[in-house]
Image (cartoon, rainbow, N blue to C red):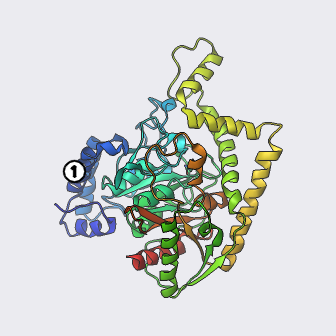
């Protein structure tokens, strides 16, 4: 039987010509999940339900009444609410929590006749870069099971790569969609802050959080973005800007001006093969008629500290709501209210999350606020402005997605600072709130995928996707 899990746009043609049914496709993907359980990509699979929904969607397709994503099988990161289904954000503290409503993203996917297959494993509350920090254990990379799939949306990346679903919806606060996409050889899109509603996403750092898309192709990313983006009465930070038809212009061939950030390529921590492949990718673009210029970005060294100060501050307030009273887990041996709070949070959160809550509370404390939090906000503005300056002269900024390819499981568990380094290139777009996409750009000597990152201007996802699709075709 052929694989029904590569590009959804191809599969749609098979549906239309009645060569394949959604029921067969779902069966195949469920089998892949069953035979690759060791990857630990899913925390919950809704097999019964998706089989029932597949029958209904198939009827719609037969009657030519299917929605734009009819038959697309989608996995959700365990940070995205699916009404009446468990939602744990990879944390013990949300044990037994059932989402009482759909995230806007989920609602829109279902309305477009996508089929939701399950919830995917991740780092606890999205905090991590390797999917080793979650309550449900480590996610393995389908391409080399001694290595991580990246994080925090590692389960979402592993599931698409291992053909367990067509597309995954992850969340990206500082790289959690783009970095696992790079580690697994996929396309990973983080749109502009505010392009997709955050309603129903578990909050990590609210001024950074975005939903994102992991897929095999740029076209699949575009089809999904078209459906899930747009204004939302439940999220005042979701932009009212009109959502263009992203799939329409994908094959338009314009010539663009591209800035390559020198400091990203001369960085000592960059794996040499990634540098070589990035340069090669730029060379291909040049040959295709685009203008490539090297541009200095001296603020690069401030991006990571700025990011980690601000996200920890926001996380410490966002996670205050998990107090043992309102959600999920409550310590059973607490006798006073204060003990409920203390024991629940002590046992409910794991080490990385507790560390970040403490650091976040520290930088917000009266004596530190000015020197840490306020200062980081100022640097954030400087970085934003510097990026905007570049994007006022160039169409795109190009840089590697990660400093290394997928690393071995357990490499950095006891060395979190080194782990943070792997976010060096992804946090830039997050700090600035700009749209960014990671694209496959060859493999290293161990055959591990390398990602290249393209950052576009605010709300110019259509242009970004068109350029990405062009890159995709020239790299092939
Ligand atoms: N690795 C980064 C962090 O731990 C990014 C995570 C994310 O984007 N959710 O904060």
The spot of residue 422 in percent (x, y) is: 55, 54
Locate the C terminus by quadrant: bottom left
Q: Residues within 10 Å of mark 1 (few under 14, many from 20)?
A: some
Q: Position of residue 124 (x, y in %)?
A: 51, 39
Helix, strand, or loop for circle 1?
helix
* Residue 439 in view: yes
Q: Residue 259 appears at what percent x and percent y? A: 62, 76
Q: Nearer the viewer, residue 320 or 100?
A: 320
The N terminus is located in which quarter?
bottom left
The correct choice, above or below, for 329 with respect to 167 in the image is above
The answer as to whether callout 1 falls within 8 Å of ligand 1 is no
- Percent position (x, y) of residue 171? 51, 51
Residue 235 left/right relative to 156: right
Q: Residue at x 61, y 62 (%)?
A: 268
- Identify the residue position indicated by label 1 in the image: 27
Q: Residue furthest left?
A: 1
Residue at the spot 57% in from the left edge and 37% down from the top edge: 352
Q: In the current view of this chain or complex, which residue is farthest to the top?
A: 335
Q: Is residue 69 left or right of residue 279?
A: left
Please tell me which residue is depicted at 49% across the width and 43% down the height of the picture.
123
Q: Quadrant of residue 240?
A: bottom right
Pick whichever, 384 or 57, lies toward us: 384
Check the image and report above or below for 309 versus 294.
Answer: above
Q: In this view of the protein, which residue sits in the foreground, 447 or 453?
A: 447
Residue pictured at 30% horizontal, 58% vertical: 71
Number of marks present in the image shown:
1
Residue 60 falls in which quadrant of the image? bottom left
Using the rendered image of the protein, determine whether residue 452 is visible from the camera's viewpoint: no
């Amino acid at each position: 039987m052929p694989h029904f899990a590569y590009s959804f746009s191809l599969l749609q043609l098979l549906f239309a010509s009645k060569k394949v049914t959604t029921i067969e496709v779902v069966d195949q993907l469920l089998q892949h999940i069953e035979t690759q359980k060791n990857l630990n990509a899913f925390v919950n699979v809704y097999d019964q339900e998706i089989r029932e929904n597949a029958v209904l969607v198939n009827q719609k397709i037969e009657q030519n009444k299917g929605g734009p994503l009819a038959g697309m099988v989608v996995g959700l990161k365990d940070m995205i609410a699916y009404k009446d289904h468990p939602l744990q954000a990879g944390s013990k503290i949300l044990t037994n929590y059932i989402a009482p409503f759909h995230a806007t993203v989920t609602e829109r996917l279902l309305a477009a006749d996508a089929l939701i297959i399950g919830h995917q494993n991740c780092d606890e509350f999205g905090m991590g870069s390797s999917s080793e920090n979650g309550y449900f254990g480590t996610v393995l990379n389908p391409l080399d099971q001694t290595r991580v799939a990246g994080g925090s949306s590692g389960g979402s990346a592993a599931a698409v790569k291992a053909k367990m679903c067509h597309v995954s919806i992850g969340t990206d606060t500082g790289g959690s969609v783009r970095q696992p996409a790079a580690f697994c050889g996929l396309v990973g899109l983080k749109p502009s802050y505010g392009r997709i509603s955050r309603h129903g996403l578990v909050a990590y750092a609210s001024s950074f959080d975005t939903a994102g898309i992991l897929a095999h192709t740029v076209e699949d990313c575009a089809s999904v973005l078209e459906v899930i983006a747009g204004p939302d009465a439940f999220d005042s930070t979701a932009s009212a800007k009109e959502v263009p038809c992203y799939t329409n212009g994908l094959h338009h061939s314009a010539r663009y001006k591209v800035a390559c950030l020198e400091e990203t390529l001369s960085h000592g921590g960059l794996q040499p093969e990634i540098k070589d492949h990035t340069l090669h990718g730029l060379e291909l673009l040049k040959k295709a008629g685009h203008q490539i210029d090297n541009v200095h970005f001296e603020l690069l060294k401030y991006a990571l500290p700025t990011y980690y100060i601000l996200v920890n501050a926001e996380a410490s307030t966002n996670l205050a709501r998990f107090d043992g009273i309102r959600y999920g887990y409550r310590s059973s041996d607490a006798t006073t209210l204060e003990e409920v709070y203390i024991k629940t949070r002590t046992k409910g959160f794991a080490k990385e999350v507790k560390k970040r809550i403490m650091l976040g509370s520290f930088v917000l404390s009266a004596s530190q606020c000015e020197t840490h939090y306020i200062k980081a906000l100022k640097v954030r503005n400087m970085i934003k402005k510097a990026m905007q300056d570049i994007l006022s002269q160039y169409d795109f900024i190009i840089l590697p997605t990660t400093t290394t390819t997928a690393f071995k499981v357990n490499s950095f568990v006891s060395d979190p600072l080194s782990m943070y380094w792997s976010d060096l290139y992804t946090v830039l777009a997050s700090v600035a709130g700009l749209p960014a996409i990671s694209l496959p750009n060859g493999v290293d000597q161990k055959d591990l995928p390398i990602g290249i990152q393209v950052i576009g201007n605010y709300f110019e996802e259509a242009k970004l996707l068109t350029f990405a699709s062009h890159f995709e075709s020239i790299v092939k």
